[in-house]
Amino acid sequence: MALIFTALTCLKTIVTRLTFSILAIAMLWPALESAQSIPQAEPTVITVTGQATPVSATSASVMVVTRQVIEDSHAENVADVLRQVPFLFVAQSGARGGLTTITLRGGKPNFTVVLYDGIPINDITDVLGGSYDLSTMSTDGIEQIEIVRGPLSSMYGSDAIAGVINIIPRRGEGKPMFELGGALGNFLTRDVTAGASGKNGNLDYSFAGSYLDIGQQVKKDPYSLGTAGLSSHLSLGNDKLIRFVVRYQNAEASGFPPGGGGPEFSILQQAQAVHTIELVTGIGFQHQVNQTWLYGLNFDFFDRTQNSNIPASLDAIPPTFNSIPTEITDTNFKRYRFSFTNTLRLGANFSAELGAGWMREQGVSTGVLAGTIPDNFTLTRDTADANGVLIYSVRGLTATAGIRVDKTTDFRAVYSPSAGISYRFAPDGPRLKANWGRGFKTPSFYALADKVVGNPLLKPEFSRSYDVGIENNFLNRRLRAELTAFRNSYTDLIDFSALVFRLVNRSQARTQGAEFALTAPVNSHLELRAYASYLQWRLMDTTEPLRDVPHWQSGGGITWKIKPRWHSQADVLAVGRRYDFQVPLPLEQTVGGYSTASLSSSYEFSDAFTASLRVDNLFNQQYHEYIGFPNPGVYVRVGVRYRFH
């Protein structure tokens, strides 16, 4: 009953935010009524259970961003793509190259596991305790992005409290194809891309690389990023497959440090310099023993090195103990994982996923605070796990039940159960879905060991979450609506306390809210989208707020194939105010309340040659995502791409 009451309460705010988007759909209602039914291929998702499952059959709240959407967006990085995905809150500290994170349903950025082809790439030595900086993930070579909202610790263990984002690389097919591209934009932007893919006998391959360089955007904030990646598969007959993937990234960013007041309020007006190198690689072997048993052996490795020269963030002159001293730091984080997976067919309607694994995480940090104080730590953590998921599927019903146990060095064994159900009343009828799960997160190396805000007495965080939703198609699949209500309870939440100026465990926190979306595929050339979400939160035993989480967010978009070779897309986004903390302005606590729009368009002059345009912050809105960090303004890029065989 409490969850139903929450949904009804949130609907009032959601309906208000959707008004203009619904009016836009209503203006095109005659076209909706006269349009023909549009058959569309449904994407599949592998992140929820490990099996390729149609999105409509999963009980989880899932969004799939396809290759076509990514290419039509002409975005530089994954953050720009995800910014327009419903129900995700993307926060960027300053201009491009600034720390960019994702928040799902009020969970902290480090509560979302980011995977690259199933390999976790979160860094538990970073300043946010295990988040991933999405500004460093370019879009080249990506096939699709799967986003799951809700806990998946029963599959992925620690960190998967709020959800999972799985970035899946492209797979080569057909005869060899080569691709060259480039773009120019304001702020002295230069972007070069190259790629090759194909299949030769039993071997397929897909290579992609890029280099992006941006000059000063607001103040002292140039940025450069180089990437290269390869995905390959070798078939050993009809029943065996070897998979190999590798991706390398090298980023250099300047700008003002997060929490320091930005270019508007930083007292010293000194920029930081951060150089980051990432390497992720994995190899796997699959064997289809018979029609009922498929097993796999996998090894992957993630390595992240970061050199930082961060100036002091002062709260006053002379500074008090609430200031953050200068910090020169070299950090290196490594993660090794071995896993053994099994997919079993237990009958016509039952299947199971069983697995076990071992992971080692190593973090080394060597630094100096205030020019004289050593700030060093070396930590190693081993985790052993075993997990299982049982799946029952018949006609319009899919039910899942899973559990995982993790034993981590210096912490007790943790059990993470989950359950979900999805039921469609008729082939074109409404679908009900519900999920429940428990999650956990061990304290990050940064949270335990940092000399400024770290706390070696921190305990693991735990969550208990559930959601219920309904979705339905109207007008012969020409209008689709979805409503989901959710509630999350967190115990021993690790949070920054401005009062004691360190990380502490909160006794309990709660977030709850609702998400509503409308999609109207008018015809094969035009699609309209609108969505809104509302979030309530509460921290027990403290008067401090939950920071960096807006109460509401809404948006919409239009995808329009003006001609067979001319594609355009426009998106709008509105975000409510939220709480923030910047060292020089301890009494200024809120920021935000902004809207922005983007436009992308491309024209294929031939099968080989395409020209594109992308404009971010189309109307040059002056807004802040963090106090003191202004958006640099309208950002225009013009690009070309040439493909040849």
Image: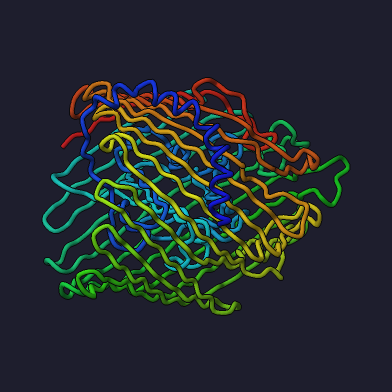
Quadrant for residue 607, please give it: top left
List the single residue furthest toward the right. Answer: 318
Question: Residue 514: where, in percent of width, then height?
Answer: 52, 46
Side (left or right) of 2 relative to 323 = left
Residue at 35 percent of width and 22 percent of height = 28
116 over 242 or under it: above or below:
above
Q: 488 or 596: nearer the eye?
A: 488
511 over 227 or under it: above or below:
below
**Residue 150 visible to an observer of this rendering:** yes
Q: Quadrant of the N terminus?
A: bottom right
Q: 340 or 333: nearer the eye?
A: 340
Residue at 64 percent of width and 34 percent of height = 592
600 over 335 or under it: above or below:
above
**How is the model colour-coded?**
rainbow
Q: 435 or 63: nearer the eye?
A: 435
The count of marks equals 0
Question: Residue 556: where, in percent of width, then height?
Answer: 44, 31
15 over 311 or under it: above or below:
above
Question: Residue 426: where, in percent of width, then height?
Answer: 26, 51
**Residue 304 visible to an observer of this rendering:** no
Side (left or right) of 78 relative to 56 = right
Question: Residue 111: where, in percent of width, then height?
Answer: 55, 57
Residue at 42 percent of width and 52 percent of height = 61
Q: 207 or 461: nearer the eye?
A: 461
Side (left or right) of 69 relative to 577 = left
Q: Quadrant of the C terminus?
A: top left
